Amino acid sequence: MDHLDALEAESIYILREAKAKLDRLAILWSLGKDSNVVIWLCKKAFFGHVPFPVLHIDTGKKFPEMYAFRDRYAKEWGLSFIREECPPLEATDPTLPPAARSAARKTLGLKAALAKYGFEGLILGIRRDEEAIRAKERIFSPRDESGQWQLKDQPPEFWDHFMTSFPKGTHVRVHPILNWTELDVWKYTRREGIPVIELYFAKDGKRYRSLGDQDITFPVPSTADTLDAIIAELESTKIPERAGRAMDHEAEDSFERLRRAGYM
Amino acid sequence: MPHALAARPLPIVIVGHVDHGKSTFVGRLLYETGSLPEGKLEAVKASSERRGMPFEWAFVLDAMQSERDQGVTIDTTQIRFRSKLRPYLIIDAPGHKEFLKNMVTGAAKAEAALLVIDAQEGAQEQSRRHGYLLHLLGIREVAVLVNKMDLVGYSAERFGAVAEDFRAYLADLGVEPKAIVPISAREGDNLTRHSPRMPWYQGPSVLEVLDSFPYAALPVDRPLRMPVQDVYKFDQRRIIAGRLESGRLQVGDRVLFSPSNKTARIKTIEAWHVPEPPAEAVAGQSIGITLDEPIFVERGEIMSHESDPPLLTNVFKARIFWLGERPLVIGANYKLKLATTEATVVVEAIEKAIDTAELRPLPPEAIPRNAAGEVVLRSKRILALDEYRSNPRTGRFVLVEDFIPVGGGTISMEGYPDQRQLLTVRASNLTAVGHAVSRAARAARNGHKGGVLWFTGLSGAGKSTLALALERELFAKGYHVYVLDGDNIRGGLCRDLGFSPEDRAENIRRVGEVAALFADAGFIAISSFISPYRSDRQRAREAAGENFHEIYVKADLAVCEQRDPKGLYKRARKGEIKDFTGISAPYEPPENPELVVPTDELGLEDCIALLLRYVEEHFRL
Ligand SMILES: Nc1nc2c(ncn2[C@@H]2O[C@H](COP(=O)(O)OP(=O)(O)OP(=O)(O)O)[C@@H](O)[C@H]2O)c(=O)[nH]1
Ligand SMILES: [Mg+2]
């Protein structure tokens, strides 16, 4: 087994644990490279099936390419697709910096969807290497009644025994690719031939490394216009992945505040 | 186009006492090896200045606001980096006692560890506790970093003193550190190359030590174990899903599921989006299989080959570490999670409780938070498991209380038998001969029913004395009665058996079967054996079918030991007899015996009277 095989086996194990232990589960599909890998891993774990609804929390501000990708693969992959809208900016915490506030719409949309469908668990494609706060996550990570992440008091998690039962009112985030890196995701995408939104490939000397809302996500300088080139670029680059995400850079604690409140 | 196989990052945990410089070390190591992303140094600088601190390398890892404000790591984190040789996964663990559960969370996935000790302070409480936990978690590859050498003037002497003190502690645990390296994490000394400030140090740099740690081998050569994770019905196929924890598997193999004891053959190994269906699988893979027969299998069972199955038992010993707010106590119930199975277990005994910081025994009434110990756990149902030393992944477990994992442990079966032999009906092709003479007819002729009086109790409790006296009395009253005891069983029927836990269990199984035959023949069979295990007595009860009476011949261990008619206790205390019940092997008292005869409270006459009354009542027609 090489490193990608080991990561794949671990992720499959996590997804199967989630399915075996939790009743109402959904996958959060942000349309980016990570959540596409998660859907792919589901098909691996469940022999060609994605046995959970796939939820897209739509800010209405994604790139047109992303919407086209969504509409195509929701069909092609046979997903049971749910789209939910986000509340307006005015509904978010006004003390947050502007880009963070914009991101916080997604948290509110997510919470509303959770309440509407009564999901007990959400599968998300976040990774430790994206951001230092995410690096401290658990694979099965509980959220309390008010949807808060108790970052300072997380349950122990060891020997692949995850927290799979909860007091009433709590829900759980499941992170099957938490231990992957950006490079792992691309190498796996290449190995498996997973479809990719073209925005990730360089055009006119720029490409997106991370895809969010149009108004708060910016492309980075790059000439990588193939998967091989992206991988080669990442093997040597020192520019962090989320450099093009405005919300991460407004204040030292923006991301922590967002995540505590329930951001993904 | 084929691509080079990606090397697996070696997971290394950094442990040690609070403030001894673990996070600083990691931050600086990443810097020294050019692994920090662009902008990180500036961000850390700004963050340190904002708090009026000098540059804090630890902020590379300590990302929470409260971690930075308080200068302490709260939760574990992971970060990748690569040396020239290979990639690493560095796991930074918190050193504060309050966050030991987070340290365990991080350390449990490591294959090697660096233990950081402050040169000024020397080894402290958590240095020792972490050393102990590494050992319990099965991490054998350990190196020690004596940090903050800048604060002791890079003194070889101080280094030697700290190093020797801790080497001695580790030796007590049976751990030999791979290296002990003097460093200054903050100044970068001896991290990636030799520091001119410590010319007296000839050993390897930290990076060289890292590169010398071996990968833990995947257990492909151990017996096959695949805990069943789930059973799916997709596209007309019934797929059994699970991860191979050890061993290997091929299409066509005959496999056994435990504890249900069902067998079948592997028809296919299923996979999606692969060039061709796999013909075999090895440890580490998450797979799905179909079987040639539609047997019913559930999550929690362990699939193995027939020739090398897991143990079956409902009671076992374990070395555990405890993280729960409330201490672990005798009689408490916890949810056990072992591979994919869950069961309620009760703490039957605490044999040892250990303060892991001082390696000091604690009173064995309870195991408090952050301590360790040895316990006996019993579950209501039979579990399939392995001893930790023969298969770590199916020989360890987690205990859960109120939804939260509160402890972990590794299994030992020392003193307890494998119950597989006893549970498996091997001669299943035999059909019982139908007797023309019924039980009722025999009872009518004899004037009493047949049945079993199963005496159980410690050596010296008075079983044989009572059994023989009762036999005499009953015989005199016209009963058909016969005593089975060591003298008439061990010499013949069980001549081939010794005194190992397995042999003892087999001995009792045979006695149970013979007693059942006597009962069927219309006799009252009195069996007089210590029969210390509940599971064995339960099987004797099942063998007899009906009219089985468990009689607890009860006397305190202290009383028995004082009586010591054959001098056995004395010898056992001296260690001359191994596995002696009550001393070095467990006795499990009956939970609901039909009758208790307290020989330490009643005289012999009263005991016999009690028994006679009981028999008259239950056997006389
Ligand atoms: N002089 C000196 N100070 C150091 C050195 N290494 C760490 N420190 C300081 O020691 C303090 C604690 O360092 P940390 O790296 O946070 O310690 P830690 O072991 O990670 O602490 P916890 O994670 O909270 O257990 C910080 O103020 C560091 O700057 C060193 O080599 N020399
Ligand atoms: Mg630290």
Image (cartoon, rainbow, N blue to C red):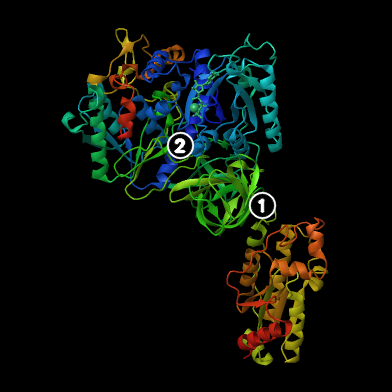
Q: Is residue B435 above or below residue B361?
A: below
The circle drawn on residue A12 is 2
The circle drawn on residue B413 is 1
Q: Is residue A208 above or below residue B108?
A: above
Q: Is residue B87 above or below residue B616?
A: above
Amino acid of disc 1? Met
Tell me if residue B84 can be seen.
yes
Q: In the visual, does B220 lie left or right of A160?
A: right
Beta carbon of the mark 2 residue lies under 8 A of ligand 2: no
Image-quadrant location for residue B359:
top right
Give SS at disc 1: loop
Q: Nearer the viewer, mark 2 or mark 1?
A: 1
How many callouts does the rendering have? 2
Amino acid of disc 2? Ile
Tell me if residue B310 can be seen.
no
Quarter of the picture containing the N terminus of chain A is: top right
